[in-house]
Amino acid sequence: MIEQHEPTGDLAPDTLTVAAGRPPREHDSPVNTPIVLSSTFHETRTPEAGDRVYARGSNPTWDPFEEALGVLEGSDLPALVFGSGLGAAAAALSLVPTGGAVVMPNHAYAGSLMLAADLAAQGRFELHTVDIADTPSVLARLEALAARFSRGALMLWLESPTNPMLEVAELAVLTEAAHATGALVVADNTFNTPLVHRPLESGVDVVLHSVTKWLAGHSDVVLGALVTRDPEPRARLLAHRTLHGAIAGPFEVWLALRGLRTLALRVERSQTTAGILARRLTGHPAVRRVRYPGLPQDPGHERAAAQFEGFGGIISIELDDVATADALVAAVRLWLPATSLGGVESLIERRRRQPAEPSTVPEHLVRLSVGIENVEDLWADLDRALRSAQAS
Ligand SMILES: *Cc1c(COP(=O)(O)O)cnc(C)c1O
């Protein structure tokens, strides 16, 4: 069984990223959990509930990461790690009863939308997409669905800020309204990380992470995780993981925990740099619009300032047209032209290059994932590439 190895009670989140999930303090024992490469475990007696038995169910290398992420998100229960963020999303969606309904942001992560649409097409549930920043319309949709569905048949899926439009939802208001209809609330907290926002504290039932992004932070693993405070859905999510088998490899989880140790430094640096770049981009002759909740004029600014402890490391910019956007991505030399986000290296991508991206995302929108390089080097490369793209 998983035990809390250290007192974590009143420690600040940036301390927890370092202190949580350590092996017991025993003389000569390692301070880091070793990578356990074993598919099976000695069984010298009949197994009891919680015994390891077989590594599709649990692995000692998962424990410290699950313990640390659970504590960071404000749960007494360990997180559940999955083989990918979408593996975790599939488990979360399995909590919707057949014949129920799911309400999702129209600009949720494209993969989550595709997965939910696929399940809806198979008749598992109805899928309703909403503008998650438009609180009255989301409330009206929940009310209309509550009139048609029994309690417990609905799920509200939150993602805020959205990807890549960076719209900010009123998480606590929507969660309370969803709970009033008996809905279960899931929040994809990938963009914020638990250092910037902890959705369980707003009453959200299940928190989802693509660990691939900020938590692991080095663009070298694909992993996902779910966190809940409630043992009942956690038992169902654990059963889903074990039976569907979308499990994580021990080495990848070890890398994710290693990455988590520096999360606070990385997020602080990325956020600071993103704020500086967003302000400079706002005045740039080649940039039509900057989306970044940290800018005072951004539509999500007030909500983000009220709810979050920071504005994140993702900026979206709109250029004159697709050709200029593509020319920008082709002209950068330091920024890496690649999808994904949340790594130490800064990435740039015109999102609509991905066929799955919703058509309501502007074609000329470029998403920037700000890494930890020197801000002046990042700016010099971006500014030069923007000027050359506009001239081309
Ligand atoms: C990447 C991402 C996912 C999917 O996670 P994978 O690890 O790629 O499966 C889900 N949500 C958000 C917000 C993401 O950025």
Image: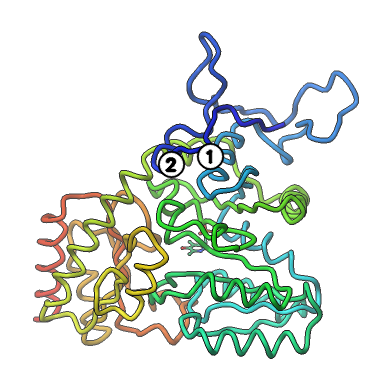
Using residue 298 as the reference point, say whether residue 238 is left or right of it. right
**290 to 84, vertically: above or below:** below
* Residue identifier under label 2: 260
The Cα–Cα distance between marks 2 and 1, rounded to whole angstroms, is 9 Å
* Residue identifier under label 1: 68
Residue at x 71% of width, y 86% of height? 145
Q: Are marks 2 and 1 in contact (CB under 8 Å)?
A: yes
Residue 305 x %, y %: 34, 67
Farthest-out residue, front: 10
**Mark sitting earlier along the chain (2/1):** 1
Asked whether the viewer can see residue 339, the reply is yes
Farthest-out residue, top: 27
Viewer-side residue, 37 vs 192: 192
Q: Amino acid at mark 2?
A: Leu
Q: Secondary structure at mark 1?
A: helix
Quadrant of the rendering where the N terminus is positioned: top right
Viewer-side residue, 6 vs 102: 6
Q: Secondary structure at mark 2?
A: helix
